[in-house]
Image: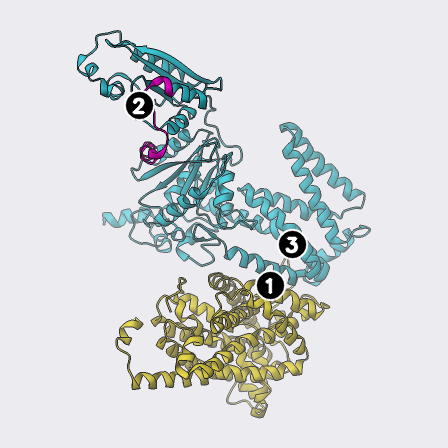
Amino acid sequence: MKKETLFLSSRQIILLILGITIGGGILILPGRCARVLGAGGWLLAPISGVIFIFGAWVTARLGRFFPDETVMEFSRRLLGRPLGILVSLVFILFFFLYVPVEIRILQELVNISILRRAPSWFVTGAFLLVLAYTASGDFDTMTQVNEFLIEVCIVVGLLVALLGWRYFNPVHVRPIFSVGKMELSTYWEEAGMILAYTGYPVVLMLYPFTRRPREVSRASVLALVMITLINTFFIVTVFGVFGYAETAGQAWPGLELAKAVNIEVVVLERLDLILIISWISAIFTTCFLAYFFAAFGLSRMLGLRSHSYIPWALAPVVYYLSTILNNYFTWNKWLSYFSILAVLTGLVLPLFLLVIALLQRWLEPPAGAEEEKG
Amino acid sequence: MRGDKEKRKNTGAGALHLFPEMEKNISYLKEKIGKSNDVVFREYVLNLPDPVPICIIFVDGLVSKEVINEYILQALTFKGELKSEWIRDKKNLVRHIKDNVLSINEAQILTNLEDLITMVLSGETLILFDGHDEGLICNTRGWAHRGVDEPETESVIRGPRVGFTEILRFNTAQIRRWIRDPDLRVRVMKIGRRSKSDIALVYLESVANPRVVKEVEKRLGRIDVDGVMESAVLQEMIEDRHFTLFPTIQSTERADRVVAAVLEGKVAVVTDNTPFVLIVPVSFWEFYYAAEDYYHRWPMAFLLRIVRFLSFFFSLYLPSLYVALSTYNPELIPFTLTIRLAGSREGVPFPLFMEVLLMELAIEIIREASARLPGPLGQTIGIVGGFILGDAAVRAGLISPLTTVVVALTAISSFTAPNFGMAVSMRILRFPLVLVAMVGGLYGLALVSFILLVHTAGIRSFGVPFLAPFVPLQPADLKDSIGRVPYWAMVSRPRSYRPLDLKRQKTKTGYWWKAFFHPPRREEKDKEE
């Protein structure tokens, strides 16, 4: 296949990974970590970070073997048609499930802060329409919108977190000497925290569009490092301000943090509004990118010329799923399923495919492959 | 322009050729254009040893009669001695007349009848010679026109007070007076089946991106209309997105603006018969740049820009934010203000959004009325409408005072947009935004903003992203965006437009943030040392 016309720079790749990863996940991360590991919970953030940095590196390495193809094409070449289609479906399902799972978080955010009595059909429906409109656009628009929104979100989010440091108490962040309850058995219930890290499998869809495929590995590792740092900073701030016990009891520690940051402002009474709006934007970037890549992957897999009507066609399905997930416990269960899918697409499958690709290369090295890649 | 004519001469091979007999030519031309009384056929005889009948054809009113009388007719009346060498060479009489007799600056020989007719109708004078199948075209254009004025729509406190006029040649000459670079290209094409209007493409060949120039040419070449009334006709036909509220081509009356754009590597499209010149490509933010930003010192320009962008935000969002906050999230408004708000709304019969919509509508009506009425009357309507109506409505308890303040502030903010087209887009957008705020509060506003962002990010103006340099971020172009850095730090042309020549001035560094620390005085000192 020929190179596409659009060329992503490595900065854009970093921002795409940040855009799809940073969303609802970071909001639920501190609470879940606190419930699993107790006082040392914040350590889970950097530890998971390291694991997923490795995953991102493996994924990017795998993509470099096939710089002109997305996972939809090369999985078929590596594993044969039926298995390849299965792998493609797993990836598409992963991106697709992102949307209803995140929409549930968005609903909660909207209902507890800006529109208190808004019915969920309105919140979900309106959001879904905007999502479908956005995801049916072209790649270029997608990257640009993401670029703009995610930068603003990160800056605002970090600003709020920094302001929270006025109430920071270092005693709260004691991983070793403090006696906390450690309930590893609950990990399955809280597995949704992975949501704060996954999203990087998107690089497997980006290779044909990148300007310099060599830089992708570095870019994706860098993106994951940034995500780990952001998550760690955020969780340390939340732990430091509230202490683990309080954090564990909160559903939305991030929001509580914003409410705690009380700054005398002249025009607005409270600052959390700005955080919420920027967080809605972050969820929006996550959702439209995931939705776009699900549709895009599907169109690639089916050999369609355009992906633009797929988001509209899938919208009722997303709507139906998000109504199922309205129940917190169902949602949580789905989050756990989703995290299996995330581990599958982020760690297991890339590693597996990489091994096969390496084996294949080892068995029959293609002539001039090294030169081609550059 | 001359080169253009040369080309046409060659392409016109299949068209009707001049006949050798003058009578035939004249009867053909009379049949074609002679039925109008303003076309003059002046027959005359060349006083040669062997007299040659000639005919001078022109359109009365489009030509300068002085030129015809003094430099054509007088020259053709051979009073003095005739140099005999060329008189004998009868075959090349027309060429000799052109080269040796006429004292006119632009003259050429053409043979295609259709071309000749177009030229005569554009104000040139045609001389036909009996026995020759060639016509001599002399440039005698001269018609009534107004002088160079300061444009009313884009006035400045400091800066040149020159605008374009309706005459294409004057306009291109104005640009030429600013840029005396041999690379400045003025390429003329004719558009309009019946109007055959002259359209000039003006750009710097060594700076403008050739792909943009080619694209503009291509799009202009596709146009097939009967007449080009104004540059708006071209604008709507060549813009990138037709179904959008936002203009993607800039139009201006100010010569200095066009010159600055051409220097940045853009392409200007000058249309005959209108002072409005189109500039492509353009980004969204440029509609909020005023010519004046570049004439005041840079800190002031900074302030002006920020004020303008703030008022852009107000003009788009203020009424809807007001509705959203006071309907759904009064807890976000400071407490005392909330009390005020509630107090002022007491007894008002309409719901808040209705109140805002009605006031907005009233403002639109007042604005339109004052624009349609002649000068002093228009101002009266503004005062009557604004003050008296608003005050009366508040006193009657129909509208709360706070709403009046919000709507008035919005209206005033929308006047700060230097570009009328963009200001109107914002006015149109404001209404749906108020409705959305009523239905969905801040959440709805956020969603609509996403749609707006996605929509505008998808727009390209001749290949340039519409939201550049912010989306995608181009740090080197931020020097001239929310504010403006001093001239000595504007070292490069905007990269978003991909000019061929990036460097605007000779400095040690390529980026403004580095140049910022090297003001000219300091560089001088470095040199001395």
Read off the chain for label 1. Answer: A
Q: Amino acid at mark 2?
A: Asp
Of A111 and A161, nearer the camera is A111
For the residue pair B86 and B366, the one nearer the viewer reads as B86
Q: Position of residue A255 (x, y in %)?
A: 61, 72
Q: Quadrant of residue A164?
A: bottom right
What residue does disc 3 label?
Answer: B433
Q: Colour of chain B?
A: cyan
Q: Main secondary structure of the magenta part?
A: helix
User: Relative to the observer, which residue lies in front, B107 or A168?
Assistant: B107
User: What residue is disc 2 on?
Assistant: B133
Cα distance between the residues tagged 1 and 3: 15 Å
Label 1: which residue? Answer: A130
Please report contact status of discs 3 and 2: CB closer than 8 Å, yes or no: no
All told, the count of numbered labels is: 3
Identify the colour of chain A in the image. yellow
